[in-house]
Image (tube, rainbow, N blue to C red):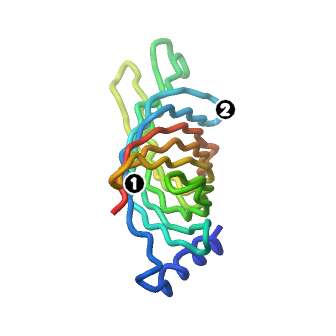
Amino acid sequence: MRILILGAVSALAFASPSAAAGFHADIHGGWDSVSIAGADDDGIAYGAALGYDLPVGPNMFVGVEGSIDDSSTKECVGDLLEVGDSLCAKTGRDLSLVARLGTNLGDRAKLYVLAGYTNARLKLSYTDSTGTVSDGENGDGVRAGAGLQLGLGSGAFAKAEYRYSNYESDFSRHQVLVGLGYEF
């Protein structure tokens, strides 16, 4: 994974200006399925991304992309230590930096795979008859996925993307996202 990211960054650093494809930005949202220690729950993910793609041949490209996301996903279990208590885990912000490698499908579409680093916040709260105690933890992880980006004209594009992320502490997620963006 580090080699893929270093390769993408190196290609960007030594690219001639005439070969540069440019920056892209998007907003996205969709399905988020989180698994924490074997307990699963679904929610809505939403976020934004900024990236840079560079052609590396007649039909191939390599790029880097950073994103910030959040989610409505929350899992609670009750009656753990006493009747009426609850332990809840809620996903917080999710930051990622990934490398993209793909192919152009004609003049308007891009098919790509992605891999890289992700860091998610997990918020924990325990409530019993005496009150609520809360804490948060950041989890480092790896992300892999694939997507399709379709040009809509004048630099605008739509995308569909699948992402799998695996973090520390038996925490993972699957996401299926759609988005709208702009290449500049």
Residue at horizontal 54 percent and vertical 44 percent from the top:
161
Q: Which mark is residue 9?
A: none
> In the displayed structure, would residue 183 be above or below residue 160?
below
> Label 2: few (<14), some or many (≥20) within 10 Å?
few
Q: Which residue is mark 1?
A: 49
- Can residue 173 be seen in this snapshot? yes
* Amino acid type, residue under disc 1 in the picture: Ala
Q: Position of residue 143 (x, y in %)?
A: 59, 54
Q: Is residue 75 left or right of residue 123?
A: right
Q: Which residue is mark 2?
A: 38
Q: Position of residue 153 (x, y in %)?
A: 37, 49
Q: Position of residue 97 (x, y in %)?
A: 49, 62
Closest to the observer, 67 or 129: 67
Q: Quadrant of the N terminus?
A: bottom right
Residue at horizontal 52 percent and vertical 41 percent from the top:
160
Residue at horizontal 49 percent and vertical 84 percent from the top:
15
Q: Secondary structure at mark 2?
A: loop
Spatial CA span between label 1 and label 2: 29 Å
Q: Earlier in the sequence, mark 1 or mark 2?
A: 2
Nearer the camera: disc 1 or disc 2: 1
